[in-house]
Amino acid sequence: MTDEPEAAELSLGARARRIDAVLLRELWLGGRSPNAKEASDAVYGASERHAALTALFSRIRAPVINRPSRGSVERRTYRPPDLHVASQATPFTMQRALLTSDVDPAIAFVVARGQSGVLLARADSDRVVGIQGSDVLSQLRSELANGPVMLMERFSAHAVRVFVVGDVSVAERCPFVWDPTVSAAQRRRHQYHSLELNAIEAAACQEIVRRLRLSFGVLFLAQSAASKQLTLCGASALPDIGRASPKIITQIVDCLGQSLLGARW
Amino acid sequence: VILVVGAVGDLVVRRVCAGLLADAVPFRLLDPRYFPGHHGISLEFGGATVDGYLRFGAERVDLASISAIFARQPDTSSLTTLDGKVRGYEADLHVGRLLEHFPGTVMNRPSTQASNGSKPFQYGAIQQVGFSVPGTVITSNPLQVHNLHAELRGMPIYKSVSSIRSQVALLDNRDGHLRDVAFCPVQFQEWIHGTDVRVHVIGDQTVATEIGSTALDYRYPQKASEEPVLREVVIPGEVHEACVRLTRLLNLSLAGIDLRRSAIGEWYCFEVNPQPYYAYFENRRGAVTRAIVEYLAATVSPSSPPQGEGQSRSVEIVPRDHLTPSSIASLSLRPSTPSSRPKARSKPFIRAHLRPVLADAVDAERLDDPSTLQGRLLSLLADEVSWYRELATGA
């Protein structure tokens, strides 16, 4: 590799039949080490595979969706603090969030939000849980005993997803206002409907994804039922288009196809 | 106020603290091993600015009063807490978010350290500033390894692809463990004959150290005659410029750059370390510590809010007793003071070379009660402060 990678070879084991998204995700994000004899071997193997793939994806002379770049943090999920810089000078408000290890500011944050409660996330997990009700303070103390937490404001709004591929953005919105009494499993079954963003909003979404050094990402926003104001709540570098409406999926796949064929590069 | 993030058992952290103390630059030390608990962090996002505070024992320091951060964040995930729980990654990620989103100068932010996770990933930037990179093949195919003597000039060596430290070793086709290459990708490179030079870049300053050793990997001498001999040297102007440009290109303000000057005077670069253990290379002149302290002190101004890189040079004078309250409160009773060099490897075959060397890892032991640590911290820092003050007086 004195100039550019001159050759690359991808070999599949005899039992492997296909490369699918799960396999690629495992390779990219760590995954299993089938030959590992010890736990430290597995950790080392995952680190070396990831380092090798990072180098390959960053330097290969071909379009790469989300090419690794110097200075970018490899992150799957972006919470409000991670979007603080990327969202500046956009028309969106930011979901307020508190990162804390102390009880007093956590209680103050919850009290300021009144009855609506807050969402709690751990930094090393994609999981978000709602905290509300009469025992909210004891819940908080219990959580803080296990380590620092991230608290996020919760509001009554429509969930909006905006998929961005390069300079194209497509949006969809949940027809129901977010209701904490509806289970997560039920919410996952909600069919989103297409949403037309105005030109400024669409451009802002593309700019945020560009600032995150992504060429394909999804932004999670909340749209106020009354004012229609959009609040940025999160983002992901690994968009799951499986639950999007068929029309949206078609648009995204078309854009990704054009990108990979070089039409958009 | 300067915030130093790091384990007090780390000699680099102690030297930076000692330099700040000796130069009367106000600072606080946040030892991630005592966060959360003795230390606290609270940051609120959503407005135009990031607001919040850091807590050192009972003392709160407003985020707005911190002008710069020196970060040497240890991995504390395997530590156990006082009640016997394994910490996990949560606390480290929380500290990482502080370093990432702090609005002032950070030496260095976690995101800028990401490039070091893949050595070949850095090669593009290295070549962009004009350094050479040895011919490299990365493969997990044992059959290809047998052809490397023809494919690469000279004697191929191998080492890790990622930032996990491994001992550089010569490739021997007779080695019965070559099939282990199938375990994961391995980086093979042509061996460059020459002299190793470690260049530390601090802002736009460089401090270069030549390493004289006959060992294949000077960090792991196999006999007394291979012990490295270090001496500070002056590098050519174009090499200095390239090192500074490379550091900026990777958005770093501190870097340890591994160079080798070949027998014909060509400069090769192997790696840029964003969190260099420079204390190993630093001679009695203490030039790296001094440059870091100057860089950080330049951000401190008693009358202005936190600024970006290289602002006012006015320094707030802090009385000596500023150290004694809970400002620098955390210290292990058994500080894991790094040895003068990384631990040597024992098994010579490929698998052994490829496994992680844990010399720099934080010991997975129970944490000490921070309330008992003050006196020990002061005595440790006192030695370093004396060392630093001797530098200033030329003693």
Image: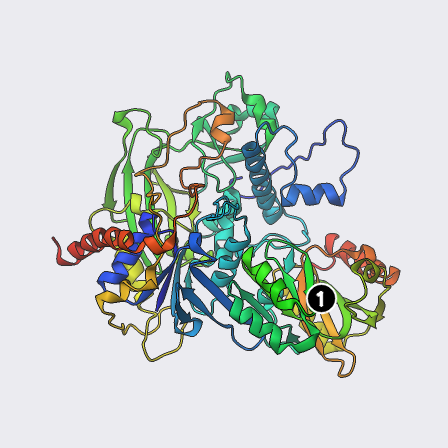
* Residue name at image x 46 percent, y 48 percent: B82
Q: Nearer the viewer, residue B338 or B160?
A: B338
x and y percentages locating residue B337 in the rendered image: 32, 43
Element assignment for label 1:
strand
Q: Is residue A240 visible?
A: yes
x and y percentages locating residue A76 in the rendered image: 65, 55
**Left or right, residue B173 beside residue B282:** right
**Left or right, residue B230 beside residue B151:** left
x and y percentages locating residue B128 in the rendered image: 47, 52
Quadrant location of the N terminus of chain B?
Answer: bottom left
What residue sits right under mark 1 in the picture? A220
* Residue name at image x 36 percent, y 79 percent: B304
- In the image, residue A159 sits, relative to residue B119, either above or below, namely below
User: Which residue occupies the extreme bottom position in the image?
Assistant: A227
x and y percentages locating residue B332 in the rendered image: 35, 48
Total labels: the figure holds 1
**Left or right, residue B193 beside residue A190:** left
User: Which residue occupies the extreme left position in the image?
Assistant: B395
Pointer 1 chain: A
**Left or right, residue A24 beside residue A192:** left
* Residue name at image x 25 percent, y 62 percent: B21
Snapshot quadrant of residue A25: top right
Q: Is residue B236 visible?
A: no
